Image (cartoon, rainbow, N blue to C red):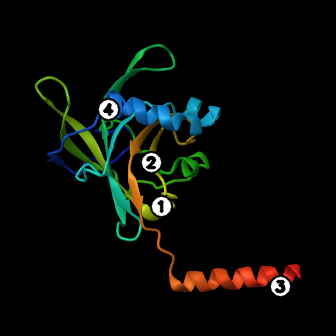
Amino acid sequence: MREDSKTQNGTKSLDLTRRRLIQGTGAIAITAGALPLLSGTAAAHFPTELDIDVQPGNEENFIDLDEHESVEVVVHPTQFVNSDGEMEMFDPVKRAVRYRFGSWTTLDDGNGARPLNDGETVETSSGHGNQESEESLSLEFPVADMGLEGDEDTVWLYWERDESGEHGYGGVGKVRVYGNTVSDQDLVQRLIEVIGDTNEST
């Protein structure tokens, strides 16, 4: 049973080939490229230790802001050396569901999309040797709360250690973001605002 969370909705099998974002060479490239964007505080409070897969059924990991209402993120078990110098096993199935997901700037501001529910346990390949299966956690996040603008190539997941939301672990995934079409009504409203600002300054 997961800490501080409701009973699991069940277990389903998930047939996918996983990318080890934290343990593989692809993860090193993603993390190395993204870390310069992090402030010292964010990096310290949410070290990048989580192993996540964004849109696992989609090879391009694309997010369409105009079409997608939610995005699936699978959180895999991972083991790492924590800040105390001790080996720690992060099992998402047993951890409290306290996640935020979205652009880094949105998460850094204390915002981000929260899971639509407690998630679902899924069986995934461990990616080791004989491809043993492991239990991971599949979560759905509403696109509208992610703070994406359409030009991002990475998205972030924060897990909060406690209710304060100030400390925990982070994970990063490579994506392609499309859409964010501005409606005609929004364009007209923006034009009115620009004209109004121009008139006030003359």
The disc, 1 or 4, on the residue closer to the chain's N-terminal end is 4
Which residue matches tag 4? 91
Callout 2 environment at 10 Å: few (<14), some (14 to 19), or many (20+)? many
The x and y percentages for residue 14 are 16, 46
Depth check, front residue: 109 or 25: 25
| Residue 66 in which image quadrant | bottom left
The x and y percentages for residue 132 are 13, 29
Between label 4 and label 3, give the one nearer the viewer.
Answer: 3
Which residue matches tag 3? 199
Q: Point out the image quarter for the C terminus.
A: bottom right
Between label 1 and label 2, give the one nearer the viewer.
Answer: 1
Give, as a three-letter code, the residue at label 1: Gly
Callout 4 environment at 10 Å: few (<14), some (14 to 19), or many (20+)? some
Residue at the limit of the structure toward the right, as seen here: 202
Depth check, front residue: 109 or 20: 20
Give, as a three-letter code, the residue at label 3: Asn
The disc, 4 or 3, on the residue closer to the chain's N-terminal end is 4
Which residue matches tag 2? 155
Which residue matches tag 1? 150
Between label 3 and label 2, give the one nearer the viewer.
Answer: 3
Q: CA distance from mark 1 to mark 2?
A: 11 Å
Callout 3 environment at 10 Å: few (<14), some (14 to 19), or many (20+)? few
The disc, 1 or 3, on the residue closer to the chain's N-terminal end is 1
Is residue 161 visible from the viewing direction of this image?
no
Q: CA distance from mark 4 to mark 2?
A: 21 Å
Q: Of the numbered discs in the image, which one, if any, rests on residue 48? A: none
Look at the picture and state if 47 lies above or below 9: above
The disc, 3 or 2, on the residue closer to the chain's N-terminal end is 2
* Residue visible at 29% across and 38% down in the picture: 93
The disc, 4 or 2, on the residue closer to the chain's N-terminal end is 4
* Residue visible at 28% across and 43% down in the picture: 137
Q: Secondary structure at mark 4?
A: loop
